[in-house]
């Protein structure tokens, strides 16, 4: 309880520092690469939490697909459009409000979680991420959310094509 | 407790030796692979190929390497320096790391320590391979963008879109391979997948009941496209894009792209061998050598593994020598309109056949096969302090 | 028992060292032997000897973006298939029907994409 191991500290530093770089870096492509690095750090944290499958999925989807999509999106806009954003007052207020709300929500959850119970539950079932167990719970216990996920993906597919095809008309 | 610590240290030393071996073999093999390709393609085209440096031109790649090392290190103007330096490194790291989970031989006993010939056997090995494969795109995208060259950018984009498109059917073909090997008791760890293909070539996944051949073929095609090799070598279509994403690279940074390409060829061959062609198993399950020839016997599986990977490397050469390059729209259409639906239908067919035919052999539920603490690979000490 | 992820970490460190070492080595050799002689023509972007017109950061087709988006969605689907692939024979027909439904819903989306011409590269 309470002790910090060196892999945890290294991964924590990797995740946080690259996340700060994402925000602070002016060059938007470098910021995106740094975001990928931050996701990699999160995958490492999942590994430490005994969730290797989740870690693999994190790398495959967040690092290998979503960050690539972000890079593509950046390259799709012309370089001229990538001037440093203007620092208007309303931008500050708006982004500040969103950030504060997000921080407040996260802080509330973190403070109000009874971590001892979570820890005990995790020790009672250390096998929840063991792949066969994962499959069983996906296809039996959580069957309905699982099928809903496919509907969600379907909606996203339709959204993707509409987004791309609308662009072509104008 | 003391003995336990000692055995961990021994295991660590063994792991270090294996890592050094794997990295050294890849780095030494690549120049000869390049030479072999040049010789083979020359032979097909009725040329002589490299024959000046060393016997049969064997040292040609070495000479090329030295030349690259002493070339002027050109840094083109207007490049994004950080990403320009980073791209070849990012390309090389996953190429070397994939080999960590591939079993290249059976157990071997040296100086009283028995160890498996694999750097590490992860319980989610196949996911590790896929995750690293998906990181290969970064090198291409970043090199293309950082170079500040139209050819590089277009080549990088084309290449990354191609890699992303073929990664999908590749993953789906691997799902089919997992299903076939799980019908024989395999799991997601690559060692268990190889173990499930023992006792003769008719048990190898690509031949098993005739349902493994299609995923095998799909994996191989996607593997070629992932490594950007002919006939899918669009990104470096020299008539259109000069050299694609590495147009502006010279010296050792260019050599790194080259190394990564050939290391990736080895990886794809090794994964195809592991998933579909029985890994290190010999085709016929007959013990030829007596038990007394311990070390030689242990090297037999390494021999079979090398032969199989060598076959795939030869196939790479031969495809390059015989097939013309695809057109880009055909290439993307082949992935999205051909391979993806085929792979999805194939998964359902394979699942149906296995469910139909393989119910009678009762297998204990794999959840009870091994304790969970071993499954997640930690030493039993939970929490972030697990290391 | 040695944690199986430790060798992976070591191999990654070795890979980083090899790759970065080779990159740095070129720069070092270039510095020692004074191999770097840049001039304005040489450091131009390579365009087959022509003087480059305009910057390299041209806008490109939205198709690439669409490919990346579709890749994410189908990749998520593939991730869901992996655990099932390992245990599907225990789940039997019920599991197959459930997974068939999952793939079927996405197949409907796939057919819609095909009809809308998402896979035509023009």
Image (cartoon, coloured by chain):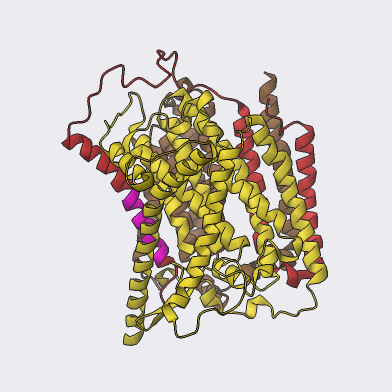
The answer to whether residue A113 is visible is: no
Taking depth in this image into account, of B137 and A46 the one nearest to the observer is: B137
The quadrant in which residue B367 appears is: bottom right
**Residue A133 location, x and y as percent?**
64, 71
Vertical comparison of B94 with A79: above or below: below
The residue positioned 80% from the left and 44% from the top of the image is C108
Vertical comparison of B95 with B350: above or below: above
Q: Chain letter for yellow, please.
A: B
**Residue A147 location, x and y as percent?**
75, 56
Taking depth in this image into account, of B362 and A139 the one nearest to the observer is: B362
Q: Chain letter for red, please.
A: C
Magenta span: chief secondary structure:
helix
> Does the magenta segment cover residue C27?
no
Q: Chain letter for brown, please.
A: A
The residue positioned 71% from the left and 52% from the top of the image is A149
Vertical comparison of B320 with B169: above or below: above
The magenta-colored residue range is C7-19
The residue positioned 49% from the left and 53% from the top of the image is B266
The answer to whether residue A2 is visible is: yes
Vertical comparison of B60 with B115: above or below: above
């Amino acid at each position: 309880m309470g002790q910090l191991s060196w892999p945890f500290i290294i991964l924590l530093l990797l995740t946080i520092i690259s996340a700060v770089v994402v925000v602070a870096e002016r060059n938007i492509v470098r910021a995106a690469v740094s975001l990928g690095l931050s996701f990699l750090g999160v995958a490492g944290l999942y590994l430490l939490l005994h969730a290797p499958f989740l870690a693999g999925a994190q790398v495959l989807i967040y690092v290998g697909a979503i960050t690539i999509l972000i890079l593509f999106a950046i390259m799709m806009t012309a370089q001229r459009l990538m001037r440093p954003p203007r620092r208007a007052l309303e931008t500050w207020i708006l982004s500040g409000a969103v950030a504060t709300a997000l921080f407040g929500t996260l802080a509330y959850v973190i403070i109000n979680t009874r971590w001892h119970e979570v820890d005990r539950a995790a020790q009672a079932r250390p096998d929840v991420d063991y792949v066969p167990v994962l499959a069983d719970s996906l296809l039996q216990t959580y069957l309905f959310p699982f099928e809903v996920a496919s509907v969600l993906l379907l909606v996203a597919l339709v959204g993707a094509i509409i987004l791309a095809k609308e662009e072509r008309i104008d | 407790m003391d003995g336990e610590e000692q055995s961990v240290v021994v295991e660590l030393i063994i792991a270090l030796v294996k890592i050094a071996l794997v990295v050294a073999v890849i780095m030494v093999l690549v120049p000869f692979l390049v030479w072999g390709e040049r010789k083979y393609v020359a032979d097909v085209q009725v040329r002589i190929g490299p024959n000046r440096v060393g016997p049969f031109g064997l040292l040609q790649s070495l000479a090329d390497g030295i030349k690259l090392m002493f070339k002027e290190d050109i840094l083109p103007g207007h490049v994004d320096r950080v990403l320009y330096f980073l791209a070849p490194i990012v390309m090389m790291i996953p190429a070397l790391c994939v080999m960590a989970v591939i079993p290249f031989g059976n157990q071997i006993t040296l100086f009283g320590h028995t160890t498996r010939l694999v750097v590490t056997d992860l319980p989610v090995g196949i996911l590790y391979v896929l995750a690293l494969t998906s990181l290969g795109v970064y090198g291409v995208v970043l090199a293309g963008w950082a170079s500040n060259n139209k050819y590089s950018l277009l080549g990088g984009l084309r290449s990354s879109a191609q890699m992303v498109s073929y990664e999908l059917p590749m993953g789906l073909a691997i799902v089919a391979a997992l299903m076939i090997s799980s019908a024989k008791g395999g799991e997601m760890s690559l060692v268990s997948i190889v173990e499930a293909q023992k006792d003769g070539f008719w048990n190898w996944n690509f031949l098993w009941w005739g349902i493994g051949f299609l995923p095998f073929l799909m994996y191989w095609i996607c593997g070629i496209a992932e490594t950007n090799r002919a006939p899918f070598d669009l990104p470096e279509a020299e008539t259109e894009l000069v050299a694609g994403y590495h147009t502006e690279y010279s010296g050792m940074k260019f050599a790194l792209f080259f190394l990564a390409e050939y290391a990736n060829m080895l990886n794809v061959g090794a994964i195809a061998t592991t998933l579909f062609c029985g890994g290190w198993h010999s085709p016929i399950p007959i013990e030829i050598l007596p038990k007394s020839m311990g070390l030689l016997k242990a090297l037999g599986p390494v021999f079979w593994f090398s032969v199989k990977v060598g076959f795939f490397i030869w196939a790479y050469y031969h495809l390059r020598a015989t097939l013309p390059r695809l057109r880009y729209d055909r290439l993307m259409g082949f992935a999205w309109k051909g391979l993806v639906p085929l792979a999805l239908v194939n998964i359902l067919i394979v699942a149906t056949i296995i469910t139909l035919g393989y119910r009678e052999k009762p297998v204990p539920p794999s959840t009870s096969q091994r304790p969970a603490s071993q499954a997640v690979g930690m030493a039993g000490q939970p929490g972030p302090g697990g290391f | 028992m040695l944690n199986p992820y430790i060798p992976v970490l070591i191999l990654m460190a070795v890979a980083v060292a090899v790759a970065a070492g080779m990159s740095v080595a070129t720069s070092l050799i270039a510095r020692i032997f004074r191999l770097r002689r840049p001039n304005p023509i040489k450091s131009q972007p390579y365009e087959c000897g022509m003087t480059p017109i305009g910057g390299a950061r041209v806008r490109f087709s939205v198709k690439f973006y669409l490919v990346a988006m579709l890749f994410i969605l189908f990749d998520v689907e593939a991730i869901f298939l992996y655990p099932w692939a390992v245990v599907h024979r225990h789940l039997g027909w019920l599991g197959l029907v459930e997974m068939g439904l999952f793939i079927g819903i996405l197949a409907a989306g796939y057919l819609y994409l095909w009809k809308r011409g998402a896979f035509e590269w023009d």
